[in-house]
Amino acid sequence: MAEVALRKVIKRYDDVEAVRGIDLDISDHEFIVLVGPSGCGKSTTLRMIAGLEDITDGDIMIGGDVVNDVPPKDRDIAMVFQNYALYPHMTVAENMSFGLRLKHYPKAEIKARVTEAARLLDITDLIDRKPKQLSGGQRQRVAMGRAIVRNPKVFLFDEPLSNLDAKLRVQMRIEIKKVHQKVRTTTVYVTHDQVEAMTLADRVVVMNKGRIEQIGTPNELYHKPATRFVAGFIGSPAMNFIPCRLEDVGGKLNVRLTDRISFPLPPARAARYSVLPRTENLLLGIRPEHLTESNAHLEPGVETFDTVLDVTEPMGMETLVYFGLEGTPICGRVDPNAGAKDGAPMRLAMDLNNMHLLNEATGAVL
Amino acid sequence: MADVVVEQGRLARAASPRKRASLRHAMGRKSTVAFFLTLPLILLIALLVLYPAFYSVYLATLNKAMTKFVGLSNFTFLFKRETFWMVVRQSCIFAITAVVFKALIGFIVAHFVHNIPGKKQRKWRGMLLVPWVIPPAMSTLAWLWLFDPSYSAFNYTLSFFGIGPIPWLGDTFWARFSVILVNVWYGAPFFLIMYLAALKSVPDQLYEAAAIDGANWWQKIWHITLPMMRNIIAITTLFSLIVTFANFDIVRILTSGGPLDRTHLFATWAFQVGIQSSDIPLGACVSLFMVPILAVAAVFILRDVNKRGNEA
């Protein structure tokens, strides 16, 4: 077990900079998830920690030691790959014990460790099978078992659930979390799936175009995103961004969305935004769950407006409603019994207590 | 009640044309259709392979003038000749040594070529395949000149180092060395290309997983590359063993079996005995001897392939 640190890590391929100076401190026992769209440099970062890619500049430290030039086999890490990378000619037990056998561990200890890992992952019955005889989920467990038996300083996961179907993915997600609760090894996990990131991580690192956009707990990222990218990436359906402008109306600070719609800001928000120039082009960020059906008892800070729905998507526990506000497509979440219908008019309520205000040009959350 | 009656009637009717139904069923099976579709080719192969094979068995049982059936006496005659056992030994030495070196060189060069990046690799692949695509009769002629004792490039070059002249084709050891060398030169590209294809089919992530598991380069070859290539290695070796064992052109052109029959193989000796000495039954006898030896090798190697076939 160990902490991992990245200091100004850069990776350049010929003239393309895949990772542009990353600083990251991962503490002992922590479960860190690197998340971002494809090509954001998250897998490259993981592979640099593993030692499978050289770093162009900067330092990577594992357990306090700089490991820039240490080959993967001497870094004391274990990795779980997207396509499992199990050795097809070895049985499950041989796959799991391969690393230990190479290091000439005593046979009794190898057996004990494999048995223990198999028990932990519930694959005891599969121990003599070949990978070909296993299902996707079982293979994934074996790949995890191969990592666990080594008892390494750090676990690295490279999109381990991407090859599984949706139902199994949810199941394995919970398994991974359970395993981490028992084993407590420092873990770096890469995924493009923000739900996986939110559900697994102690802290999430959101990456974009080779840079870190924000590091924080899942709740911090969700409720206090630092940039438009993070605000739009975390959460499903994604946050709505509505072009807006601040204006003073009768001594109060209002946010104007369209010619017809202008809402007074709640006092706390008004105090925070009052210093902003009134002419600046801004974006109002509001999550779909804060755009709901209107009801008789509106809380303070909740404002209503009328619209015509384009499309509705009944999900069972809620109905997603889609409509346009001067050309900007917007999504809201309403009660399934609120009577939302395709093409029908509806009065919606916007909870401005949970709004975000962003600079349209820079994308920064204000 | 009515339902049951109808049901019974249907059953009774279905039972009577069972035979026709089973024929239709057999015709409907994919394997049956496949068999009929390949039947013309099977017949052609039977005509071109089985007929000559059985004809040679028939020939082997005749006397030299091919007028009388003599049973197995051609075989018993062969067993008593020392030259025959020498040819058996030489064929085995030739085939095994050549195949081992072809496999070894092919494996090593395939690794080098595999690690050459992108476009350059295609050029190297093309160049390294040249020995294999030139008709061996032609390329062996070039080797014949290279081996010439007085005027050859080899001996000329060696003379600068104070070595030689070496009687490449005149001395037993060097003659055997030379025919094996030319066979390796000609056959190694085949191994190279097969191994290269096998190497490319091993997923990179297995090597990465092994690297993280703590394997060094040799352990990666031993635990990943070789097991993943096992089937290709087995099949390539068998194929090459058969072709090398039955080699004719290289020995025929370089040494014609000399000096003193010391480089004769089954095929060249069968040619000499059967065609040049006009004893066709005895020649047929010699060539038939390759069958049991190769059959044993094939059984051993292919049994292994079947066993592992469903692993990867």
Image (cartoon, coloured by chain):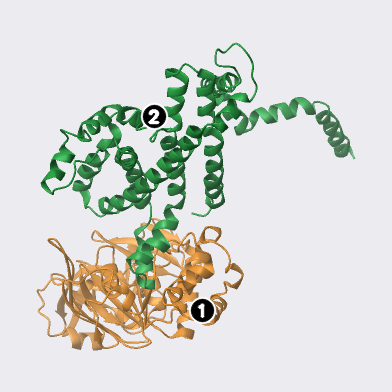
Chain colours: A orange, B green
Q: Where residue A110 is drawn, which disc sits there?
A: 1
Quadrant hosting residue A47? bottom left
Write the residue at 16% across / 76% down. Answer: A246
Quadrant hosting residue B58? top right
Write the residue at 19% across / 46% down. Answer: B119
Front in this rendered view, residue B290 or A73: B290
Image-based side of B4 in relation to B187, left or right: right
Read off the residue under disc 2: B248
Type of residue at label 1? Answer: Ile
Write the residue at 44% across / 28% down. Answer: B269
Front in this rendered view, residue A301 or A141: A141
Image-based side of B88 in relation to A58, left or right: right
Expressed as whole percent of the image width and height from the top left, the position of residue A305 reads 31, 70
- Chain where mark 1 sits: A
Expressed as whole percent of the image width and height from the top left, the position of residue A27 reads 32, 88
Type of residue at label 2? Answer: Phe
Q: CA distance from mark 2 to mark 1?
A: 54 Å
Label 2 with label 1: CB-CB less than 8 Å: no
Tag 1, which secondary structure?
helix
- Chain where mark 2 sits: B
Q: Quadrant of the C terminus of chain A?
A: bottom left
User: Do the dots labelled 2 and 1 sit on one chain?
Assistant: no
